[in-house]
Image: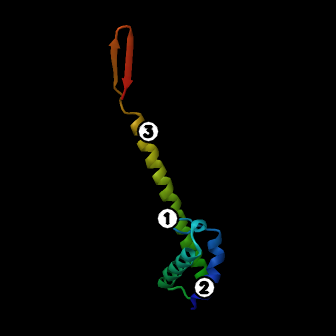
Amino acid sequence: MRKGYIFAAAGAALLTIAGCQTKPLSAMSYAESKQYVAQLIDRCQKEGVTSRQEMELCVHQEASADEAKRVNAIATRRAIGRALQAAAASQPRTTTCNRFGNTVNCTTF
């Protein structure tokens, strides 16, 4: 099966799906998106897909799976960041006060 033909078939499915785990399709350059489609096609061919219809479905499914992984990874990183911020905010603070005559200066660490 010619890859050029498959690129055209897969293009429609990929326009609506950001398929890379680390970068959405909309943020990819032309060369990057072309390389990504080639990777999806290779995955599908390794799974034994040969017909045009199956290839379109497979590429769409693989891109959807990549998008789900990417979205999940972003959500996980955000949750970890929020948890670390909450942990830092809940740490006990130390306040030291010094008195100079009628003035008291306090510093919290």
Lower position in the chain sequence, tag 2 or tag 3: 2
The foreground one among 108 and 63 is 108
User: Quick one: which residue is furthest to the front in this view?
Assistant: 101
Q: Which of the image's four quarters has the N terminus?
A: bottom right
Q: CA distance from mark 3 to mark 1?
A: 26 Å
Q: Which of the image's four quarters has the C terminus?
A: top left
Q: Which mark is residue 6?
A: 2
The residue where tag 3 is placed is 86
Amino acid type at mark 2: Ile
Q: Position of residue 73 (x, y in %)?
A: 48, 58
Q: For marks 1 and 2, give the one nearer the viewer.
A: 1
Assign a secondary structure to mark 3.
Answer: helix
Q: Which mark is residue 22?
A: 1
- Examine the rendered structure and indicate whether residue 100 appears above or below residue 79: above
Lower position in the chain sequence, tag 1 or tag 2: 2
Q: Residues within 10 Å of mark 3 (few under 14, many from 20)?
A: few
Q: For marks 3 and 1, give the one nearer the viewer.
A: 1
Q: Residue at x 50, y 58 (%)?
A: 72
* Disc 1 and disc 2 in contact, CB within 8 angstroms: no
Q: Quadrant of residue 61?
A: bottom right
Lower position in the chain sequence, tag 3 or tag 1: 1
Q: Which mark is residue 33?
A: none
Q: CA distance from mark 1 to mark 2?
A: 23 Å
Q: Position of residue 103 (x, y in %)?
A: 39, 11
